[in-house]
Amino acid sequence: GDTVKCRGASATATVPIGVVADKCAGICNTFPGATLATDNCTMSYTASVVGFWAVSLMMEDYEFTWQTTPLSATSLQFLVQLYTSRSSSCIVGPAYTENRPVGACVGVDINQTVVETATFSVGCTGVTFSDVLTTSPPGI
């Protein structure tokens, strides 16, 4: 399979036809203290400030590990909410449970709809989710 890498989105990026595009829509590098491991797309952070933080990443696909120009790239934006826990006994946050194996490839024909399921688990007994918020670009 191909190599997938992640990086922080850039405010000025040249797309294949030479057009300069803003890939982060004003939210570049806005999550304080977060670090991104580009080779496995893992983000780490130490929660220090309560609030919402917008994150904008680019996921890039390379045929070979030595390539510097990706075959394809897609942007990924999401919100992180840091809050003060109401329970001192529960310090394990919710976790995303992957529904596909790491590196799985999903083929999609043109003009076809794809539905994916995001599954999360709660790390503490007696704790439940109250809401999951998702947003998508227009038309997706």
Image (cartoon, grey):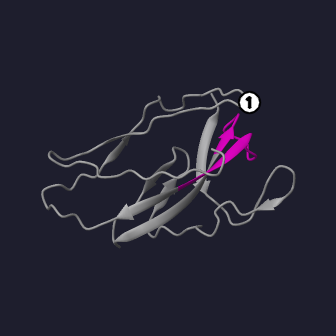
Q: Hey, what amino acid is under mark 1?
A: Ile
Q: Residue at x 26, y 45 (%)?
A: 122
Q: Picture coordinates of residue 75 (x, y %)? A: 63, 51
Image position of 138 (left or right of 132): right
Q: Secondary structure at mark 1?
A: loop
**Is 112 or 31 nearer to us in this picture?**
112
**Is 26 or 58 nearer to us in this picture?**
26
Q: Is residue 31 above or below residue 101?
A: below
Q: Residue at x 69, y 66 (%)?
A: 11
Q: Is residue 124 above or below residue 32?
A: above
Q: Residue furthest bottom?
A: 49
Image quadrant occupied by the N terminus: top right
Which residue is tagged 1? 110
Magenta range is 60-77
Q: Tag 1: Cα neighbours inside 10 Å, few (<14), some, or many (≥20)?
A: few
Q: Residue furthest front?
A: 139
Please check the rendered image and state whether residue 66 is part of the magenta-colored stretch, yes or no. yes
Please check the rendered image and state whether residue 67 is part of the magenta-colored stretch, yes or no. yes
**The quadrant where residue 29 appears:** bottom right
Q: Residue at x 68, y 60 (%)?
A: 23
